[in-house]
């Protein structure tokens, strides 16, 4: 690994830790020439995965496309960079666990929806509106109702007139 300060190629690893629910590795490094310390991250990369689109076309899997879709869903939502990266890695892990060389765009969408539902309801609905191609307000409303029914949160007790 090249030192970002002096560009020397000789660095040593001083610490290694698993991060993002063990889907990435953080390595603390030190340059052997100038002593500069820095961190690097290693993430699993999905190779040789073909995505079958709705119209039957096939294209190579693209992490960038997944990340772009998630960023749009989380636009102006309170999510940290770390949490976003963790979510992206978990979704990719779920894709890899299928253990096949092909996956449909529909299957990827379902994996994303399952994870988004647990993280942020607004991001979930935003993603669903594009993924499920809502054509009108009724489609949107139906998805909201399905989402609400699926949540296992107790309702707030009713207020009395004295409160």
Image: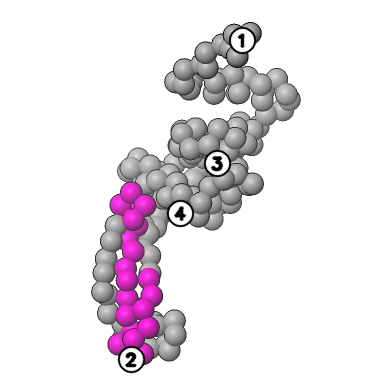
* Residue at image point 45% right, 37% down: 115
Which residue position is annotated with label 1?
162
Q: Nearer the viewer, mark 3 or mark 4?
A: 4
Q: Is residue 37 above or below residue 86?
A: below
* Viewer can see residue 92: no
Q: Front-most of 63 and 61?
A: 63
Which of the two labelled residues, at mark 4 and mark 1, occupies the earlier sequence position? Answer: 4
Which residue position is annotated with label 4?
82
Q: CA distance from mark 3 to mark 4?
A: 30 Å
How many neighbours does mark 4 have within 10 angstroms: few (below 14), some (14-19), or many (20 or more)?
Answer: few
Q: CA distance from mark 2 to mark 1?
A: 73 Å
Q: Position of residue 7 (x, y in %)?
A: 42, 87
Relative side of 159 to 100, left or right: right
The magenta-colored residue range is: 19-39
Callout 1 secondary element: loop
* Residue at image point 27% right, 79% down: 12
Q: Front-most of 111 and 18?
A: 18
Q: Quadrant of residue 24?
A: bottom left
Q: Is residue 41 above or below residue 60?
A: below
Pointers 4 and 1 in contact (C-beta within 8 Å): no
Q: Name the disc covering residue 53, or none.
A: 3
Which quarter shows the C terminus?
top right
Which residue position is annotated with label 2?
33
Q: CA distance from mark 3 to mark 1?
A: 58 Å
Q: Position of residue 63 (x, y in %)?
A: 49, 54
Q: CA distance from mark 4 to mark 1?
A: 45 Å
Callout 2 secondary element: loop
Question: Is residue 34 part of the magenta span, yes or no?
Answer: yes
Pointers 3 and 4 in contact (C-beta within 8 Å): no
């Amino acid at each position: 690994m090249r030192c970002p300060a002096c560009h020397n190629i000789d660095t040593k690893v001083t610490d290694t830790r698993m991060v993002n629910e063990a889907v990435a590795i953080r390595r603390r490094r030190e340059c052997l020439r100038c002593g500069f310390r820095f961190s690097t991250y290693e993430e699993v990369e999905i190779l040789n995965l073909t995505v079958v689109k709705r119209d039957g076309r096939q294209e190579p899997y693209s992490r960038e496309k997944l990340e772009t879709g998630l960023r749009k869903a989380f636009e102006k939502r309170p999510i940290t960079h770390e949490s976003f990266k963790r979510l992206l890695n978990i979704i990719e892990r779920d894709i890899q666990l299928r253990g096949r060389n092909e996956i449909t765009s529909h299957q990827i969408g379902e994996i994303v929806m399952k994870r988004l539902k647990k993280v942020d309801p607004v991001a979930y609905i935003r993603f669903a509106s594009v993924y499920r191609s809502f054509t009108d307000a009724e489609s949107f409303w139906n998805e909201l109702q399905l989402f609400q029914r699926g949540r296992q949160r107790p309702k707030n007790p009713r207020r009395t007139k004295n409160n």
